[in-house]
Image (cartoon, rainbow, N blue to C red):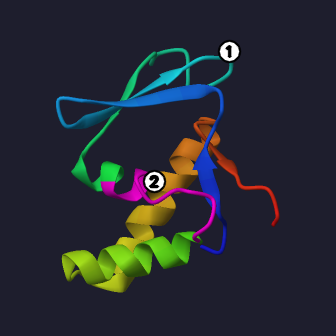
Amino acid sequence: MESRLLPSEDIVARVIEGEIVIVPLAAGIGDMQDELYTLNETGRAIWDRLDGQRTLREIAAGLAQEFEAPAEEIEKDVEGFATELLNRKILVTAPAA
């Protein structure tokens, strides 16, 4: 939860009809079955905050406050989302400042 993440340079993300669509640009991004990724409202709320400056914990705390939801639940969602996209190489760890 102390990681600072940001989108990989090997993807393009665009908002289309209110959804974020992620397109891998390089081999090895994502998996063989999926060529495009779309994010639901929760995923978009997290994605919009992944700037490499804030930790996952800070992102979760802000979302918990914004949506008036239990912090523990939001932390699990943020961590699961980040882990999945890290494994697919859609997100990368931000360089140390």
Residue at x 25% of width, y 77% of height: 66
Q: Is residue 6 left or right of residue 62?
A: right
Residue 46: image quadrant is: bottom left
Residue 2 vertical position relative to residue 46 in the rendered view, above or below: below
Residue at x 25% of width, y 44% of height: 40
Residue type pointed to by label 1: Ala
How far apart in space, not on screen, are marks 1 and 2 (Cα)? 21 Å
Residue 4 position in % (x across, y down)? 65, 64
Residue at x 28% of width, y 55% of height: 42
Q: What quarter of the picture does the C terminus occupy?
A: bottom right
Residue 5 position in % (x across, y down)? 62, 56
Q: Helix or strand or loop: what does disc 2 sit on?
A: helix
Residue 8 vertical position relative to residue 54 in the rendered view, above or below: above
Residue 90 vertical position relative to residue 78 in the rendered view, above or below: above
Front residue of 28/18: it is 18
Residue range (magenta): 45-54
Front residue of 19/71: it is 19
Q: Label 2, on which residue?
A: 81
Q: Label 1, on which residue?
A: 27
Q: Is residue 60 magenta?
A: no
Q: Residues within 10 Å of mark 1 (few under 14, many from 20)?
A: few
Tell how many labels: 2
Q: Is residue 53 magenta?
A: yes
Residue type pointed to by label 2: Phe
Residue at x 59% of width, y 35% of height: 88
Q: Residues within 10 Å of mark 2 (few under 14, many from 20)?
A: some
